[in-house]
Image: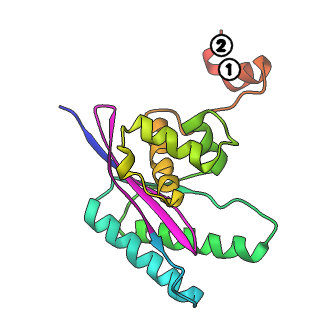
Amino acid sequence: MATETIILGIDPGTTVMGYGVLKVVSNKTELITMGILDLKKYANHYLKIGRIFERTLAIIDEYHPDCMAIEAPFFGKNVQSMLKLGRAQGVAMAAALHRDIPITEYAPLKIKMAITGNGAASKNQVADMLQRFLKIPAENMLPQLDATDGLAAAYCHYLQMGRPETTQAYRGWKDFVAKNQDKVK
């Protein structure tokens, strides 16, 4: 009997939050939905945070994900922007925790690498690869790349399912041997 897993992916933001929901059955993926939460109309940061919480809960209640994958904030030059982004991520995570949904956080580089094989890939390249992998018709692709960024977090999580905690990086043969002493005789 095939098991079904629903993965919610979130690209947090205080201007635009992107999300995508994937269904995985017998190692086959299917797009359920993707979209954005446009927060530009809210002048007050606290209203934005409240809306992120409410909308994340609504997505969870509608699609009943088994897990959530969320993009980790990256450190930029503006500390205030980083703080606001961290708050947005934390509120989305709090919504998942409120519904007992396990969360996995992925660095932007890890997500891009998993989808395209290139950690420096553009948002357009990530969207193009997702469109191919998931066979999304062109007319169903959204112009806002935040939506495909959220979907990319979910797809990255799918690629990591069934693997050890995270794919280990090795810095050479000696590093490989050192990290796998129990398997080397």
Q: Residue at x 47, y 44 (%)?
A: 157
Give the image location of residue 51, x and y in percent: 45, 81
Instruction: Give the class, few, some or many, for how many residues have Cα within 10 Å of label 2's Cα (few <14, many ≥20).
Output: few
In screen coordinates, is 116 left or right of 33? Answer: right
Q: CA distance from mark 1 to mark 2?
A: 5 Å
SS at mark 2? loop
Q: Residue at x 38, y 60 (%)?
A: 101
Question: Magenta part mainly helix, strand or loop?
Answer: strand
Q: Residue 23 versus residue 4: which sits nearer the camera?
A: 23
Instruction: Give the class, few, some or many, for how many residues have Cα within 10 Å of label 1's Cα (few <14, many ≥20).
Output: few
Q: Amino acid at mark 2?
A: Val
CB atoms at circles 1 and 2 under 8 Å apart?
yes
Q: In the image, is residue 59 part of the stretch drawn in magenta?
A: no
Residue to which mark 1 is pinned: 181
Quarter of the image with the N terminus in it? top left
Which segment did they paint magenta?
A: 8-36
Give the image location of residue 41, x and y in percent: 51, 85
Q: In the picture shown, does residue 184 fall above or below 50?
A: above
Where residue 137 sits, quadrant-wise, is top left
Residue to which mark 2 is pinned: 184
